[in-house]
Amino acid sequence: MKIIIIPVLAFALTGSALASGSAPMRPPRVPKDMTPATSEMDATRYALGKAVFTGKAVRTANPSAATQQKMRLTQLASAIGKDGASLPALAGQLSGEQMEALNYYTSKRFGTN
């Protein structure tokens, strides 16, 4: 009887000792390739792009770039989803600077390319 109890007792104690674990002594480290997004962000372009996206920017007629803008705005609208549904209507109404700022804003805000 003692022969059976000793191995069972040893097995039970070994299993509980391995399962207890210990708490880490320090918090995990931040990866070295992580940099704050604010250091890389151009606040002026971001603000202009946000104003264009929300419709608060003054629009400049630019009919010569309407077809190129329409293609890019349609791409952005499909990548963003329902928030960007009104973007294709802005084709031909944005200056080059506004279009660049809108691209910058959507890349930072929505992760588009």
Image (cartoon, helix red, strand yellow):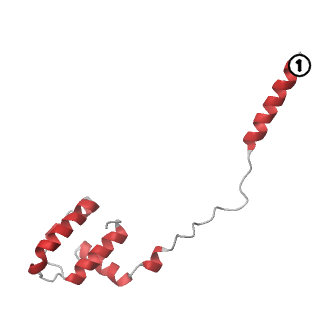
Instruction: Determine the residue positioned at 37% across, 71% down.
Output: 108
Q: Quadrant of residue 86?
A: bottom left
Q: Is residue 36 left or right of residue 25?
A: left
Residue at position x 84%, y 30% in the image: 10
Horizontal and vertical percent for residue 75?
22, 64
Q: Where is residue 35 shown, x and y percent of the image?
A: 51, 73
* On-image quarter of the C terminus: bottom left
Q: Is residue 90 visible?
A: no
Give the vertical position of 68 relative to 1 (above or below). Answer: below
Quick check: 111 above or below 46? above
In this rendering, position of residue 105 left or right of residue 72: right
**Residue 6 in the image, given as x and y percentages of width and height:** 87, 24
Q: Does 50 sit above or below residue 111?
A: below
Identify the secondary structure beneath mark 1. helix
**What residue is shown at x 36% (from left), y 69% (from top)?**
109
Query: Which residue: 74% across, 43% down?
Result: 20
Look at the image and tell me whether residue 6 can be seen: yes
In the displayed image of the protein, which residue is found farthest to the front? 33
Q: Amino acid at mark 1?
A: Ile
Can you say which quadrant of the picture contains the N terminus? top right
Between 18 and 50, the one lying in front of the other is 18
User: Disc 1 designates what residue?
Assistant: 3
Task: Name, please, the residue furthest toward the left.
Answer: 63
How packed mark 1 is, by other alpha carbons closer than 10 Å (few <14, some 14-19, many 20 or more), is few
Q: Quadrant of residue 27?
A: bottom right
Answer left or right for 40 relative to 21: left
Q: Residue furthest right?
A: 2
